Image (spheres, grey):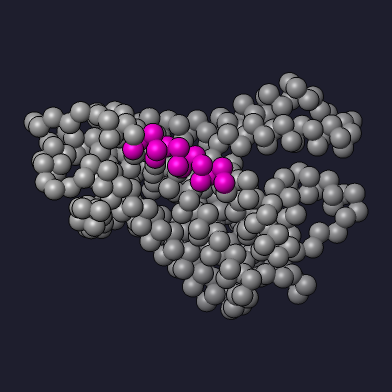
Amino acid sequence: MAGLIEIFRKELADNFNSKRFLILFLLVYLAGAATIYIAAQNIRATVDDSTRYIFLNLFIVSGSNIPFSFPLFMSIFIPIIGIALGFDAVNSERTSGNLSRLLSQPIYRDNVINGKFLAGLVMIAILIVSIVTLVAGLGLRMIGVPPEAEEILRLCMFVIVSILYGAFWMSLAVLFSVVFNKAATSALASIAIWLFLFLFMGLIANLIAVTVVPINADSTVEQIASFDTLYRMINRISPGTLYVESIQAVLLPILGTSSPTMMMIGIYSGLKPTPLPLSQSLLIVWPQLVGLLALTAICFAIAYIKFMREEIRAT
């Protein structure tokens, strides 16, 4: 543990004092507040007297003219925050020569990368908790409906899943910061993977699923179910899909499956959906949560092993 606390405190101080992160956090707060303002203006058109979890709907409803919901906003901005916190975690210290001087002190090498990762994880947690609290406070003032205990628990679970999602992107960025010597290269590599998974993974999954299981307007329920199963299985390669499916089940108690398509088929078949308790919702998305955790652990483990084995010379 020698030096871990010192590295952790130094990284936290650097992050809080960095203009880059202050500007980025300010943009995230403004975008989140705008998103929740749009949701509050349109929530009356989506709920009625029989609607449960009205406060939770504040985090789901999107605008009529701008179809941009709070979960979509989080799925876009969390990777940016994670990448920004990790893309230069190691290579910037290596390039400036601070890494060799740092390791000449009585500090173990593993505490350097562990302290940087923990500091970034705390920054992600602070950002997500603060923005969810801000959004909840604005929403409470605008709609005047206090949350139920179940809604508070679901929001807490939403925060935990979001932190885990941010940890994955930060661990990926840290991995690239260890592999590449230049911070710009690691940043571009991280952003390239994020854009590929966000923009093209769904198209690739749809193309493969349509080729294997062709469907049309006359397709049977079994064919549609087979297509949806294959499509989602391929699309789950993307951590963004795992995150979206997880928060859908957490924020939508009425969702009895991780597939909205299968949910609609059940409704058209005459099944009446009923809200699930939080424990049942977590059981539905438990594989997705384990997948996110495994991806995060794999990326950080590779970065850890690579960092521990590389040669660091004084400059």
Residue sitting farthest toward the left: 315
Residue drawn at point x = 50 percent, y = 60 percent: 159
Residue 204 vs 44, above or below: the answer is above
Classified by dominant secondary structure, the portion drawn in magenta counts as helix
Give 145 or 158, whichever is nearer the viewer: 158
Q: Where in the figure is residue 56, as x and y percent of width and height?
A: 62, 66
Quadrant placement of the C terminus:
top left
Residue 167 vs 146, above or below: the answer is above
Q: Where in the figure is residue 16, as x and y percent of width and height?
A: 25, 58
Q: Is residue 27 visible?
A: no
Residue drawn at point x = 44 percent, y = 59 percent: 128
Q: Where in the figure is residue 30, as x and y percent of width and height?
A: 41, 59
Give 76 or 110, whichever is nearer the viewer: 110
Q: Where in the figure is residue 215, as x and y percent of width and height?
A: 81, 28
Residue sitting farthest toward the top: 211
Residue 212 vs 131, above or below: the answer is above
Magenta region includes residue 299: yes
Segment colored magenta: 290-304
Question: Toward which corner of the image does residue 42 lie, by quadrant?
Answer: bottom right
Residue 268 vs 215, above or below: the answer is below
Left or right: 270, with 190 as reference point: right
Q: Is residue 91 visible?
A: yes
